[in-house]
Every structure is written in structure tokens, then in C-alpha cells.
């Protein structure tokens, strides 16, 4: 993509940490419990539907007991998550902050969670076109079926320009960071002929609403 492309870029520091809603945690495939770990009050998670209230179990030598499965983020608490890179591998770390106390919840491979989350929500464009996942995630979509010269922006049809406006809105209003590179080769047999590459902060793709918007944009020209 060395020539004939249109670029939308919002530079700056890649956000690594973010606050999330209860529906996001559920979409990732987890239940949130209040109970005890080794007899001490704690919040912790399990796979959705795997554990029940009143159940006790052991993980890595520690005894967990579930008092109550939560139906929302507890009052005066915040669900936070961040992406870290360790030994060349990305991890999603998430925890619950309650006033001055912090409850670690999990440290998982974000690629596994995203695949499960996007599959459950039927975000087919995200699943199909994701290329790599780290602090940022990039998507690559090649819909070029007729080789020709990329068109200049002035020749883009209204629908294509609308896609570019939607991308700008995502960067400006939701993620604050992103890079979108686009080549357009015209329309043939009512099919748009194009190629795109999109870089976004990974942590925002764990948000149900933002992931939905990105998925819709990736499919707007199909």
C-alpha cells in the first residue's frame, strides 16, 4: 500500500487501561462472584455458568466459596482492565476496585477472550479480518478483485466517504487513537473494490458497543 491511499490517523499515547461495564464482563464469558478466598472476603470470577451460589472449589491450592453471584458491578466499585506484554505475549489483566481495596480477577490471553466474545456477539467482520493483537490490534481487509489504479479521494462515491466519516468519529469520540489506511479502486458489478488496514487500541475492542461499531464499519462496503 505504497501509493494511492487515503489515511485517517489520530496519534498519541496508546491507551492501555480502561473502565468497563458489567455487560462487557458477561460478554467476555465470565460470572462475577462475591464470596471468600481462603476465608477472606473477595470478589472473583469463573466461566459463565460454571459455578453456583453456595459452591466451594479449589484453584491452585486456594479454596473459593461463592456467597452471591453478582448481577451488576457492586456499588462503589469499578471494573478495570489493561493490556500488558510479557515475554512477547499479550495479556488482559482485569480487576475490581472497591473504595480502597483491589480484587484481582484474572490474567488471560486477550486473543482467546476476543475470539469468544466476538463469536458470541456474531461480530463476523472482526473475527475474519483481525491480523494481530497486542497493545494495539490491526485489521486487514483485501477486497480487490480487479487490478487497477487506486482512485483519488475526489472520485470516491458517497457511501465510501460515509465510511471514512464513521472511522473519524470512532477515533475522535471513542478510542482517541487509531490509524486507518484505505485504497479504493472503484465499483464493478455493484461491488466495491477496495483494500484497508486499521489499527486500534486493543483495550477498546473489549467494549461491546465499540466492538459493534467497528464490526459494522468493516462490513459497510460489502
Image (spheres, rainbow, N blue to C red):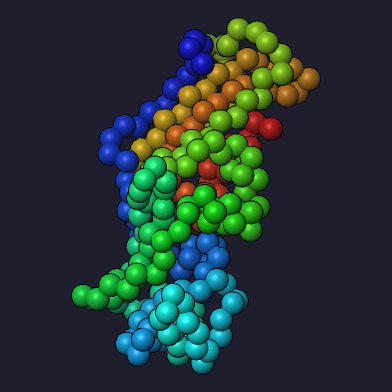
List x then y, in percent, for residue 179.
42, 30
Quadrant in the picture for residue 19: bottom left
Quadrant in the picture for residue 104: bottom left
List x then y, in percent, for residue 151.
57, 11
Left or right, residue 60 beside residue 76: right
Left or right, residue 222 beside residue 67: right
Outermost residue, right direction?
A: 189
Q: State how many labels appear.
A: 0
Which residue lies at the image location 32% right of the left edge and 53% below the top edge?
17
Q: Quadrant of the C terminus?
A: top right
Which residue lies at the image location 38% right of the left edge and 59% below the top edge?
93
List x then y, in percent, for residue 49.
60, 76
Q: Is residue 156 above or below residue 138?
A: above
Q: Is residue 132 visible?
A: yes
Which residue lies at the image location 75% right of the left edge and 23% below the top edge?
190
Outermost residue, front direction?
A: 61
Outermost residue, top direction?
A: 149
Q: Is residue 62 above or below residue 110?
A: below
State the residue in front, 55 or 17: 55
Q: Is residue 201 visible?
A: no
Which residue lies at the image location 55% right of the left edge and 26% below the top edge?
196
State the residue in front, 18 or 40: 40
List x then y, in percent, for residue 210.
48, 49
Left or right, residue 180 beside residue 219: left
Amino acid at each position: 500500500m505504497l501509493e494511492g491511499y487515503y489515511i485517517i490517523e489520530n496519534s498519541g499515547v496508546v491507551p492501555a487501561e480502561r473502565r468497563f461495564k458489567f455487560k462487557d464482563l458477561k460478554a467476555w464469558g465470565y460470572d462475577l462472584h462475591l464470596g471468600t478466598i481462603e476465608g477472606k472476603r473477595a470478589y472473583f470470577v469463573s466461566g459463565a455458568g460454571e459455578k453456583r451460589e453456595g459452591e466451594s472449589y479449589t484453584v491452585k491450592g486456594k479454596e473459593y466459596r461463592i456467597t452471591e453471584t453478582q448481577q451488576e458491578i457492586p456499588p462503589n466499585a469499578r471494573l478495570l482492565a489493561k493490556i500488558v506484554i510479557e515475554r512477547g505475549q499479550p495479556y488482559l489483566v482485569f480487576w475490581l476496585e472497591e473504595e480502597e481495596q483491589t480484587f484481582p480477577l484474572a490474567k488471560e490471553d486477550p486473543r482467546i477472550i476476543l475470539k469468544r466474545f466476538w463469536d458470541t456477539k456474531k461480530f463476523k467482520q472482526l473475527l475474519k479480518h483481525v491480523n494481530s493483537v497486542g497493545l494495539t490490534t490491526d485489521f486487514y481487509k483485501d477486497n480487490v478483485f480487479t487490478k487497477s489504479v487506486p482512485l483519488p479521494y475526489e472520485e470516491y462515491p458517497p457511501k465510501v466517504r460515509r465510511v471514512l466519516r464513521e472511522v473519524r468519529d470512532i477515533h475522535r469520540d471513542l478510542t482517541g487513537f487509531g490509524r486507518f489506511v484505505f485504497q479504493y479502486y472503484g465499483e464493478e458489478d455493484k461491488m466495491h473494490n477496495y483494500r484497508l488496514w486499521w489499527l486500534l487500541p486493543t483495550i477498546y475492542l473489549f467494549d461491546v458497543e465499540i466492538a459493534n461499531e467497528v464490526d459494522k464499519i468493516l462490513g459497510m462496503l460489502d
